[in-house]
Structures are given as structure tokens and as C-alpha cells.
Amino acid sequence: MKNISNKKIIHNFDKLIDSPLIITIPHSGREYSGKYIKNASIKGNEIRGSEDPFLDLLLKRKSMKNYFCAYANFPRMFVDLNRHPREINPNLFKDIPEGFEIMSSDYSKSGYGVIPDLVGIKKIYKEKLPWSEYDFRIKNYHEEWYSLIQNNNLKLLKRYNEILIIDIHSMPSTNYHEYELPPFVLGDKNGSSCKKTYIDNIKGFFDKKDLKIAYNYPYAGQYFIKKFGMNNDKINVVQIEINRNIYMNEKTYKLKEDEFILLRNLMEELFCELQKVLLLKNISNIAAE
């Protein structure tokens, strides 16, 4: 896969791959050095609390050769790619320009905006950040990610009538109410970002494996799905959340290597099945025109 912008984003979008399937992993970045943590007041595993650990390793074997893939190397605590670019907590910044329209949300008000000020319940910064820091992060990270995905989508839509983006995340094994979460959660913004055909195929795949999967609860998807999956019938976007307990120790951040290999094989099998469905769907669409 290709490294761009000093390894901020890893992708293979420049390759000649016959696939209408795109796999994105926005939150697995674990480069905690230099500019990413220079103003941070928390260190070690504490700073990794918002990370989706090790998911980029799902793409290290077959996937990067067979499908279009992209993942961020920079940490989520630096820029959250699943938030609107104006979704900020105003209390985090100094000198916010007059007329800047803040996109307020429950997430940003709670400290989990596009530039987070919390990891878990821990404050990342002791002092407010200058507005220039917001500009730098949005222009060089958030906008670059979305431009990359958008340009690849436009390129693929010249070749295919429909494409499918699978946006992969991980989740804790229990939520804040100590409710045990299932192995997988499938999100399509309550049926608005992906055609039912693809959702049914994903559900059926996990059903055949006797694996429990929840649908749109507690995670239905956020900004990324809204941006790409709700405005174009030709672009389908689905979010898959993977329970971290399946493949890692949540306290020590150690990978369960054997279990991870099984997970990677499972996801590669899912990608392969969806690829077949997508290619057949595109052939059917062309024949109907």
C-alpha cells in the first residue's frame, strides 16, 4: 500500500484493482510521537483510550491486493475522522474567529469533537489550543482524508454503477452501563446509507457463522456515513464495529494473535463474498440499462 504525506494516511487507491469495494479504517492510528502528543498531558495506554487498536492489521495480507483500502496512521485523539470538521468544543480553543459556525453536538459538548479534548474521562490538554492548531489539523488531516475518499469514489463511479464502502471500527466489550456488547454491530444510519441487499448479505454471512450481530444499536454510524452514504444512491456505506475482546486484551492492549488471525480470515471471507455480490449487482445494473 502507498504511503503519503509522511505516512499520515496509508492507501492503495493508485493501484489497478478490479473492485467496487472500499475498506476504510479511520481510528486505528497509533503513532503517538512528535506533533501528535506535544501538548498532551496524558501518556501511555491512557492516551490510547479512543483508538481502535490493531484494525489496520486486518489489511496486511489479501485485502490490500484485492480491494481498495485506506487507513489513518495518526491517532484519533489528534483528529477524529468521524466528526464534522466544525464539530468542536469551543472551550478547547483560543481566538475562535468571529463568524466561525460551530457545529454543536452531544459529542463535541462532551469533549469528543473533531479535535477531542478528552480520552475517556481524561483531559488531553492542560491549556487551550491556539486556533492555528485547529486550522492545521483540519486542513492537513481531516480534509486530506475526505478528499482522498471522495476522489477514489468518483474514479470508481466511472467504472461501476454501485460501490460499497465498509468503514471498520472497534468497540469495548461492555458499554457505560456494563451491558455486554455482541461480537459485531452493523450500522447504516437506520437504513439510510446502504441498500438492503448488502445489509442482508452481511447479516446472512454472520448468521451462517453463528456469530451474533446487532443492527444500528448502539452504533448506527456518524459523520462519515452521512457524508458519503446518504446523498448518492450509487454509493453504499456500512459501518462494522468489532468487539475488542475478540482479538485483544482490553486492559494491556496486547493482541491475541491466534484470535486475531481467525478474525482476519473471517473478515477476508466477508470481503470476498461482498465483492462477488457487488460485481453481480453491477452486471445486472448494466444489463438493465
Image: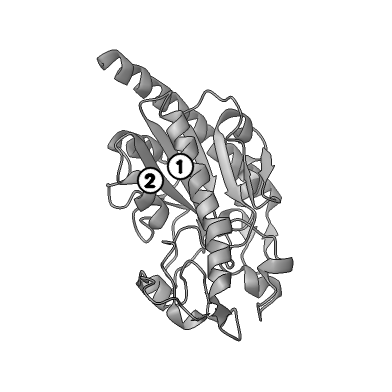
**How are the residues colored?**
one colour
Is residue 85 visible in the rendered image? The answer is: yes
- Residue beneath the point at 57% across and 78% down: 130
How many numbered marks does the figure carry? 2
Q: Nearer the viewer, residue 59 or 226?
A: 226
Kind of residue indicated by mark 1: Gln
Q: Residue at x 30, y 44 (%)?
A: 231
The type of residue carrying mark 2 is Phe
Residue 253 at what x, y percent from top left? 67, 64
User: Of the numbered discs in the image, which one, if any, rests on residue 228?
Assistant: 2
* Residue 254, image x, y percentages: 70, 60
Asked if residue 148 lies left or right of residue 88, the reply is right
Q: Which sits in the foreground, 85 or 264?
A: 85
Q: Residue at image x 59%, y 48%?
A: 71
Q: Are marks 1 and 2 in contact (CB under 8 Å)?
A: yes
Question: Which residue corresponds to the image point at 43% horizontal and 34% vertical from the top-left?
Answer: 154
- Coordinates of residue 172 in the picture (x, y in percent): 52, 64
Left or right for 238, reference 9: left
Relative to 284, does residue 267 appear above or below in the rendering? below
- At label 2, counting other C-alpha atoms closer than 10 Å, the crowd grade (few under 14, some 14-19, many 20 or more) is many
Residue on which the image places disc 1: 150
Query: Judging from the image, what secondary structure is the residue with disc 2 in?
Result: helix
Extreme-top residue of the structure? 287
